[in-house]
Image (cartoon, grey):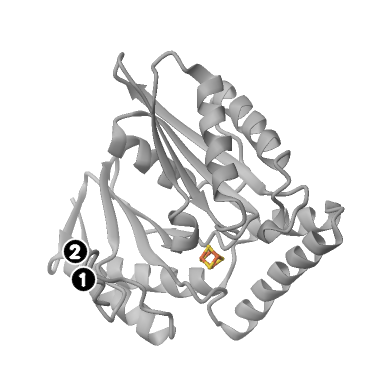
Amino acid sequence: MRKIDVHIVADKIKQLLLTSNTDLPQDLLILLKAAEQREESRLAKFMLEQIVSNAAIAKENQWPMCQDTGMAVIFVDIGQEVHLINGDINQAINAKVAEAYREGHFRNSVASPLERVNTANNTPAIIHYQIIEGDQVHLKVAPKGFGSENMSRLYMLNPTAGAEGVVNAIVETVKLAGGKPCPPLVVGVGVGGTVEKAALLAKRSLFRPVGSPSDDDKLAKLEKTALARINDLGIGAQGVGGITTALAVHIESFPTHIAGLPVVINIQCHAARHAEDVI
Ligand code: SF4
């Protein structure tokens, strides 16, 4: 059994939150720059230039790239041969999330759902734990802004809706969102399972290197079809019209009940902040 101090895990998460809010990942930057190059609309080209230059300024000064520094979404995959020691992992992580948001001068964006009282330290974080093989802890962190999260949707499709029904749901979600979620988007999709499983698949899919196709050939084909149809909508960067409404569609799937076909579409804006590490 490998012993890992919960404070080492929490410290690592703090670092990932600090860097992910200020450094846009390379995978995304490459796609944004390519979109800027091929954009035909002058206004959309300008928007993409602004997004790329904003990312450079944020990185250089270690400033957050957007005023919405998000809710901290954290996936902690724990090897079954790991024994976490020295305290409560939830408390340790939340304490470091609060520290990261204070030290990074990030906006505190978390409030009670009905009273709307701000918790004043951006906690609690949304923490998903999963047991995996081995003796390592894999961490994935994403500050999730709500301009895009608010545009996400759940469909409980007819079980016979098939691939076409799934693509229609994805395209409809993006169409209804319009310019609100700050396109160009990364569209995360979970197909199958139950309501919560589909939502988790969609969220996890956003951590794939942006634009990397699914390992499953059929899903990879669906991703391509959905992306082409989304970009035909003409919403464009920041909703000003143009040929790039989304940079990528990532689909993950899981077996589901014979009587249903859950589909969750989790919309991610161009500030697709994500970072990961292994302990
Ligand atoms: S949707 Fe994204 S880019 Fe737009 S305000 Fe929210 S976090 Fe920022």
> Can you give x and y, in whole percent of width and height, for residue 271 in the image?
57, 63
In the image, residue 158 above or below residue 189: above
Residue at 28% x, 57% y: name it. 127
**Element type where label 2 sits in the image:** helix
In the image, residue 191 above or below residue 116: above
- Type of residue at label 2? Ile
Q: CA distance from mark 2 to mark 1?
A: 28 Å
User: How many other residues sit within 10 Å of disc 2, few (<14), some (14-19) or many (≥20)?
Assistant: some
In the image, residue 37 above or below residue 194: below
> Can you give x and y, in whole percent of width and height, for residue 241 in the image?
75, 53
Side of 62 where 254 appears, left or right: left
Q: Is mark 2 within 8 Å of ligand 1?
A: no
Mark 2 vs 1: CB contact within 8 A: no
- Type of residue at label 1? Glu
Question: Which residue is nearer to you in this view: 252 or 48?
Answer: 48
> Can you give x and y, in whole percent of width and height, for residue 111 in the image?
27, 71
For residue 248, the mark is none
Q: Which residue is mark 2?
A: 89
Question: Which residue is nearer to you in this view: 233 or 246?
Answer: 233
Residue at 29% x, 43% y: name it. 134
Side of 171 where 108 appears, left or right: left
Quadrant (top left/top right/bottom left/bottom right) for the C terminus = bottom left
User: How many other residues sit within 10 Å of disc 1, few (<14), some (14-19) or many (≥20)?
Assistant: few
In the image, residue 162 above or below residue 58: above
Q: Which residue is mark 1?
A: 115
Q: Is residue 215 at least partly visible in the picture?
A: no
